[in-house]
Protein backbone atom coordinates (compact mmCIF):
# COMPACT_ATOMS: atom_id res chain seq x y z
CA UNK A 1 0.00 0.00 0.00
CA UNK A 2 2.89 2.37 0.74
CA UNK A 3 4.23 2.02 -2.78
CA UNK A 4 0.78 2.73 -4.20
CA UNK A 5 0.40 5.85 -2.10
CA UNK A 6 3.87 6.95 -3.17
CA UNK A 7 3.00 6.58 -6.87
CA UNK A 8 -0.24 8.50 -6.39
CA UNK A 9 1.63 11.23 -4.52
CA UNK A 10 4.08 11.58 -7.38
CA UNK A 11 1.26 11.93 -9.89
CA UNK A 12 -0.33 14.59 -7.69
CA UNK A 13 2.99 16.43 -7.57
CA UNK A 14 3.31 16.16 -11.35
CA UNK A 15 -0.17 17.59 -11.72
CA UNK A 16 0.55 20.39 -9.26
CA UNK A 17 3.78 21.27 -11.02
CA UNK A 18 2.10 21.27 -14.40
CA UNK A 19 -0.71 23.42 -13.02
CA UNK A 20 1.83 25.88 -11.65
CA UNK A 21 3.61 26.11 -14.98
CA UNK A 22 0.27 26.55 -16.73
CA UNK A 23 -0.68 29.39 -14.38
CA UNK A 24 2.68 31.09 -14.90
CA UNK A 25 2.25 30.82 -18.66
CA UNK A 26 -1.19 32.40 -18.43
CA UNK A 27 0.08 35.31 -16.30
CA UNK A 28 2.82 36.07 -18.77
CA UNK A 29 0.50 35.90 -21.75
CA UNK A 30 1.70 32.47 -22.92
CA UNK A 31 -0.40 29.48 -23.81
CA UNK A 32 -1.61 27.30 -20.95
CA UNK A 33 0.10 23.93 -20.80
CA UNK A 34 -2.96 21.89 -19.86
CA UNK A 35 -1.78 19.72 -16.92
CA UNK A 36 -4.66 17.28 -17.24
CA UNK A 37 -3.89 16.67 -20.89
CA UNK A 38 -0.21 16.19 -20.06
CA UNK A 39 -1.03 13.58 -17.43
CA UNK A 40 -3.39 11.83 -19.82
CA UNK A 41 -0.62 11.62 -22.39
CA UNK A 42 1.76 10.24 -19.77
CA UNK A 43 -0.85 7.68 -18.72
CA UNK A 44 -1.37 6.61 -22.33
CA UNK A 45 2.38 6.34 -22.82
CA UNK A 46 2.81 4.13 -19.77
CA UNK A 47 -0.12 1.88 -20.70
CA UNK A 48 1.15 1.51 -24.26
CA UNK A 49 4.63 0.73 -23.01
CA UNK A 50 3.39 -2.07 -20.75
CA UNK A 51 1.35 -3.57 -23.59
CA UNK A 52 4.38 -3.49 -25.88
CA UNK A 53 6.71 -5.14 -23.36
CA UNK A 54 4.41 -7.81 -21.93
CA UNK A 55 5.06 -10.35 -24.72
CA UNK A 56 8.71 -10.47 -23.66
CA UNK A 57 7.90 -11.44 -20.06
CA UNK A 58 7.99 -15.07 -18.97
CA UNK A 59 7.15 -17.11 -15.89
CA UNK A 60 9.61 -19.70 -14.72
CA UNK A 61 9.27 -22.45 -12.15
CA UNK A 62 11.43 -25.37 -11.07
CA UNK A 63 9.80 -28.82 -11.20
CA UNK A 64 8.27 -29.98 -7.92
CA UNK A 65 10.84 -32.18 -6.22
CA UNK A 66 8.33 -33.51 -3.71
CA UNK A 67 9.34 -30.96 -1.08
CA UNK A 68 7.00 -28.29 -2.42
CA UNK A 69 7.51 -26.24 -5.56
CA UNK A 70 8.96 -22.76 -5.36
CA UNK A 71 6.60 -19.95 -6.41
CA UNK A 72 7.00 -18.97 -10.09
CA UNK A 73 9.49 -16.20 -10.72
CA UNK A 74 9.71 -13.62 -13.45
CA UNK A 75 12.14 -13.46 -16.32
CA UNK A 76 12.32 -11.92 -19.76
CA UNK A 77 13.48 -12.87 -23.22
CA UNK A 78 16.87 -11.33 -23.90
CA UNK A 79 17.57 -13.12 -27.20
CA UNK A 80 14.97 -14.14 -29.81
CA UNK A 81 16.75 -17.47 -30.18
CA UNK A 82 15.41 -18.55 -26.79
CA UNK A 83 17.68 -17.11 -24.08
CA UNK A 84 15.89 -15.84 -20.98
CA UNK A 85 17.39 -13.71 -18.23
CA UNK A 86 16.26 -14.00 -14.62
CA UNK A 87 17.77 -13.93 -11.14
CA UNK A 88 19.93 -16.72 -9.76
CA UNK A 89 17.90 -17.07 -6.56
CA UNK A 90 14.87 -18.01 -8.68
CA UNK A 91 16.66 -21.15 -9.90
CA UNK A 92 18.85 -22.18 -6.95
CA UNK A 93 18.49 -25.92 -7.31
CA UNK A 94 18.64 -28.07 -10.42
CA UNK A 95 19.04 -27.09 -14.03
CA UNK A 96 15.51 -27.87 -15.23
CA UNK A 97 13.00 -25.02 -15.43
CA UNK A 98 9.52 -24.83 -16.90
CA UNK A 99 9.06 -21.61 -18.85
CA UNK A 100 5.67 -20.13 -19.72
CA UNK A 101 5.53 -17.47 -22.43
CA UNK A 102 3.06 -14.60 -22.57
CA UNK A 103 0.98 -16.43 -25.17
CA UNK A 104 0.51 -19.37 -22.81
CA UNK A 105 2.93 -21.77 -24.48
CA UNK A 106 5.13 -23.76 -22.12
CA UNK A 107 8.60 -25.08 -22.83
CA UNK A 108 11.11 -27.10 -20.85
CA UNK A 109 14.05 -24.86 -20.06
CA UNK A 110 17.61 -25.49 -19.03
CA UNK A 111 19.78 -23.25 -16.85
CA UNK A 112 22.69 -22.23 -19.07
CA UNK A 113 24.58 -20.37 -16.36
CA UNK A 114 24.05 -18.75 -12.99
CA UNK A 115 26.06 -16.40 -10.83
CA UNK A 116 24.84 -16.11 -7.26
CA UNK A 117 27.30 -13.31 -6.50
CA UNK A 118 25.47 -10.89 -8.77
CA UNK A 119 22.14 -12.77 -8.71
CA UNK A 120 21.80 -13.43 -12.43
CA UNK A 121 20.92 -16.56 -14.36
CA UNK A 122 20.44 -17.41 -18.03
CA UNK A 123 17.92 -20.02 -19.12
CA UNK A 124 17.61 -21.52 -22.58
CA UNK A 125 14.52 -22.87 -24.32
CA UNK A 126 13.96 -24.27 -27.81
CA UNK A 127 11.07 -22.49 -29.48
CA UNK A 128 9.98 -23.14 -33.09
CA UNK A 129 9.96 -19.44 -33.97
CA UNK A 130 11.85 -16.27 -32.97
CA UNK A 131 10.72 -14.83 -29.64
CA UNK A 132 9.98 -11.17 -28.75
CA UNK A 133 13.15 -10.07 -27.00
CA UNK A 134 13.46 -6.96 -24.84
CA UNK A 135 16.24 -4.48 -25.53
CA UNK A 136 18.93 -3.58 -22.99
CA UNK A 137 19.46 0.11 -22.27
CA UNK A 138 22.36 1.98 -20.71
CA UNK A 139 22.03 2.08 -16.92
CA UNK A 140 25.07 4.36 -16.67
CA UNK A 141 23.01 7.15 -18.25
CA UNK A 142 20.04 6.68 -15.94
CA UNK A 143 19.58 9.57 -13.53
CA UNK A 144 18.05 9.71 -10.08
CA UNK A 145 14.47 10.91 -10.49
CA UNK A 146 13.76 9.20 -13.82
CA UNK A 147 10.43 7.39 -14.15
CA UNK A 148 10.68 3.59 -14.34
CA UNK A 149 8.38 0.58 -14.48
CA UNK A 150 8.96 -2.75 -12.75
CA UNK A 151 7.35 -5.65 -14.60
CA UNK A 152 6.71 -9.14 -13.28
CA UNK A 153 4.20 -11.40 -11.58
CA UNK A 154 3.83 -9.99 -8.03
CA UNK A 155 1.81 -12.24 -5.71
CA UNK A 156 0.82 -14.35 -8.72
CA UNK A 157 -0.64 -11.43 -10.72
CA UNK A 158 0.54 -12.21 -14.24
CA UNK A 159 2.48 -9.56 -16.14
CA UNK A 160 1.72 -6.73 -13.76
CA UNK A 161 3.47 -3.37 -13.68
CA UNK A 162 4.40 -0.96 -10.90
CA UNK A 163 5.32 2.67 -11.36
CA UNK A 164 8.10 4.58 -9.62
CA UNK A 165 11.28 6.55 -9.98
CA UNK A 166 14.99 5.87 -9.65
CA UNK A 167 15.57 6.78 -6.01
CA UNK A 168 19.32 6.20 -5.79
CA UNK A 169 22.22 4.54 -7.58
CA UNK A 170 24.90 2.73 -5.63
CA UNK A 171 25.87 -0.53 -3.94
CA UNK A 172 23.15 -3.04 -3.02
CA UNK A 173 22.66 -4.07 0.62
CA UNK A 174 25.68 -6.11 1.61
CA UNK A 175 27.83 -4.62 -1.14
CA UNK A 176 28.48 -5.57 -4.73
CA UNK A 177 30.91 -5.05 -7.61
CA UNK A 178 32.43 -1.60 -7.00
CA UNK A 179 32.41 -0.46 -10.63
CA UNK A 180 28.64 -0.79 -10.99
CA UNK A 181 25.80 1.28 -9.55
CA UNK A 182 22.82 -0.88 -8.69
CA UNK A 183 19.49 0.84 -9.21
CA UNK A 184 17.37 1.57 -6.16
CA UNK A 185 13.73 2.33 -6.94
CA UNK A 186 10.48 2.93 -5.12
CA UNK A 187 8.61 1.02 -7.83
CA UNK A 188 7.15 -1.94 -5.95
CA UNK A 189 9.30 -5.07 -6.17
CA UNK A 190 7.18 -7.76 -4.51
CA UNK A 191 7.41 -11.57 -4.40
CA UNK A 192 7.05 -12.66 -8.02
CA UNK A 193 8.77 -9.56 -9.41
CA UNK A 194 12.27 -10.94 -8.95
CA UNK A 195 13.85 -11.59 -12.32
CA UNK A 196 11.56 -9.17 -14.11
CA UNK A 197 12.83 -6.15 -16.03
CA UNK A 198 13.09 -2.59 -14.74
CA UNK A 199 12.47 -0.41 -17.78
CA UNK A 200 12.69 3.26 -18.68
CA UNK A 201 10.16 5.26 -20.68
CA UNK A 202 11.91 4.27 -23.90
CA UNK A 203 11.04 0.64 -23.16
CA UNK A 204 14.68 -0.30 -22.56
CA UNK A 205 15.69 -2.70 -19.80
CA UNK A 206 17.95 -0.78 -17.43
CA UNK A 207 18.01 -3.44 -14.73
CA UNK A 208 16.76 -6.80 -13.48
CA UNK A 209 14.65 -6.65 -10.32
CA UNK A 210 16.53 -8.61 -7.69
CA UNK A 211 15.25 -7.92 -4.19
CA UNK A 212 13.30 -5.62 -1.91
CA UNK A 213 15.04 -3.72 0.88
CA UNK A 214 14.09 -1.38 3.71
CA UNK A 215 11.03 -3.42 4.67
CA UNK A 216 9.86 -3.54 1.08
CA UNK A 217 10.00 0.22 0.54
CA UNK A 218 12.89 0.03 -1.91
CA UNK A 219 13.52 -2.34 -4.80
CA UNK A 220 17.05 -3.16 -5.95
CA UNK A 221 17.84 -3.95 -9.58
CA UNK A 222 21.01 -5.38 -11.12
CA UNK A 223 22.08 -2.69 -13.63
CA UNK A 224 22.18 -3.35 -17.37
CA UNK A 225 25.83 -2.28 -17.45
CA UNK A 226 26.64 -5.35 -15.36
CA UNK A 227 24.25 -7.57 -17.33
CA UNK A 228 26.07 -6.76 -20.57
CA UNK A 229 29.29 -8.12 -19.06
CA UNK A 230 27.78 -10.99 -17.08
CA UNK A 231 25.49 -12.51 -19.71
CA UNK A 232 28.17 -13.54 -22.25
CA UNK A 233 30.21 -15.08 -19.43
CA UNK A 234 27.20 -16.97 -18.07
CA UNK A 235 26.59 -18.45 -21.50
CA UNK A 236 30.26 -19.24 -22.12
CA UNK A 237 31.27 -20.47 -18.65
CA UNK A 238 28.31 -22.74 -18.02
CA UNK A 239 26.32 -23.40 -14.89
CA UNK A 240 28.38 -21.65 -12.25
CA UNK A 241 30.01 -18.65 -13.83
CA UNK A 242 31.14 -16.08 -11.27
CA UNK A 243 31.92 -12.41 -11.53
CA UNK A 244 31.71 -11.75 -7.81
CA UNK A 245 32.63 -8.54 -5.98
CA UNK A 246 35.86 -8.17 -7.98
CA UNK A 247 34.04 -7.65 -11.27
CA UNK A 248 35.52 -4.81 -13.28
CA UNK A 249 34.73 -3.04 -16.52
CA UNK A 250 37.11 -3.62 -19.37
Image (cartoon, grey):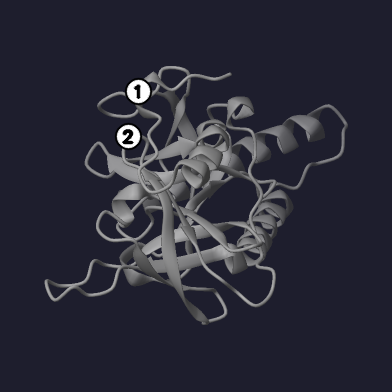
Q: Residue at x 64, y 33 (%)?
A: 138
| Residue where numbered disc 2 is placed | 117
Residue 40: where, in percent of width, then height?
68, 57
Quadrant of residue 245 within the rendered picture:
top left
Image quadrant in which the N terminus is located: bottom left
236 to 52, vertically: above or below:
above
* SS under mark 2: loop
Within 10 Å of the Cα at label 2, are there few (<14), some (14-19), or many (20+) other Cα atoms?
Answer: some
> Which sits in the foreground, 5 or 145?
145
Which disc number belongs to residue 130? none
Within 10 Å of the Cα at label 1, are there few (<14), some (14-19), or many (20+) other Cα atoms?
Answer: few
Q: Residue at x 66, y 49 (%)?
A: 135
Quadrant of residue 214 within the rendered picture:
top left
> Which sits in the foreground, 30 or 75?
75
| Residue where numbered disc 1 is placed | 245
69 to 116, vertically: above or below:
below
Q: Residue at x 21, y 71 (%)?
A: 69
Label 2–label 1 contact, CB within 8 A = yes
Measured in 3D between alpha carbons, the distance from the residue under mark 2 to the one under mark 1, in whole angstroms, is 7 Å
Amino acid sequence: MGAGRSAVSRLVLLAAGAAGLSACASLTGGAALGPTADLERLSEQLAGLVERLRPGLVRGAEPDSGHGARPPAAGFIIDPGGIILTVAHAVPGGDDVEVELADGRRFPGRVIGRDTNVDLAAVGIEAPDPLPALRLGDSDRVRVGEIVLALGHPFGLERAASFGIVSWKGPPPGGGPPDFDFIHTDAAVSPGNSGGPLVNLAGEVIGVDSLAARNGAMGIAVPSSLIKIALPRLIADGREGSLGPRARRR
